[in-house]
Amino acid sequence: MLERQSKPLDFSACKIPEHVAIIMDGNGRWARSKGLPRVAGHRAGAENLRRIINACVEFGIKILTIYAFSTENWGRPESEVRGLMRIFARVLDQEIGELHEQGVCLHHLGDLEGVEAKLQDKVRRAIELTKDNDRLVLNVAFNYGGRAEILHAVRQMLADDISPEILTEELFSSYLFTRGLKDPDLVIRTSGELRISNFLIWQAAYSEYYPTPAFWPDFGREGLYEAIVAYNKRDRRYGLVPDES
Ligand code: FPP
């Protein structure tokens, strides 16, 4: 039993997934349901992200990958994009020291070049500061798209003169932004949507998928616990029959 923070949670019969990936959806609807502007939903989403990072450290999850901003999200109203960039910058400024103390190692997935120079700089400094931490790897998919990631990998392989004869799934994976990391065991999507939305489309080929109706700001530590309990009821067969898996 772990009895930190609020409710005690029973993990005695639970296998903790090593890598959890989350599509943090529903900030806008959460805000609308309270008569607030969308950006207030993103602020509440950032607060919930803090709770989830703490819970990952508490539960012993080793890798957390979050979908923070997709290559498609640039098409949102300018005021919302600006609001989101401000939140990312503020979270980096205010939280990185504590994340570092917690043993969080920050990684970025996506194209950083496409982002405002000041924010790029903050991200690079945060990555450098936390690079030797090993309690939790936090992958932030930011200006990220799964198809763009695959094209990026193919371009790099062509530039490296990789010949078709030596190309394997392992070699291909080593050209992705997640190189060296285990594929996600569990992909969570909040807000009830049943889509993968261009997120980790190579890496999540055999992940267990957990959709939940909760909007992201309401998902919380207990929501993560319930996702882990549900994950433990799954039979991961990787295309085999039960006895072989
Ligand atoms: C999806 O909800 C959420 C996003 C596009 C942004 C996610 C960002 C945060 C949770 C802020 C904190 C993140 C970091 C990395 C500091 P939506 O806006 O699509 O919601 P809707 O579907 O209800 O409109």
Image: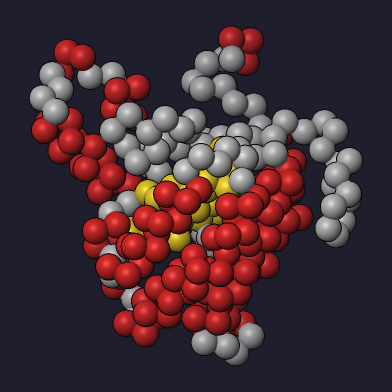
Q: Is residue 20 visible?
A: no
Whole-percent x, y for residue 191 in the image:
57, 63
Q: Residue at x 72, y 31 (%)?
A: 15
Vertically, is 165 above or below 126?
A: above
Q: Is residue 105 left or right of residue 217?
A: left
Vertically, is 104 above or below 38?
A: above
Q: Is residue 66 visible?
A: yes
Q: Residue 11 lies in what quarter of the image?
A: top right
Residue ranking furthest to the top: 244
Q: Residue at x 69, y 54 (%)?
A: 54
Whole-percent x, y for residue 204 in the image:
45, 37
Q: Is residue 174 left or right of residue 32?
A: left
Whole-percent x, y for residue 217 in the image:
63, 69
Whole-percent x, y for residue 53 in the image:
63, 54
Asked whether 135 or 226 is in front, the reply is: 135
Q: Residue 171 lies in what quarter of the image?
A: top left
Asked whether 34 or 48 is in front, the reply is: 48
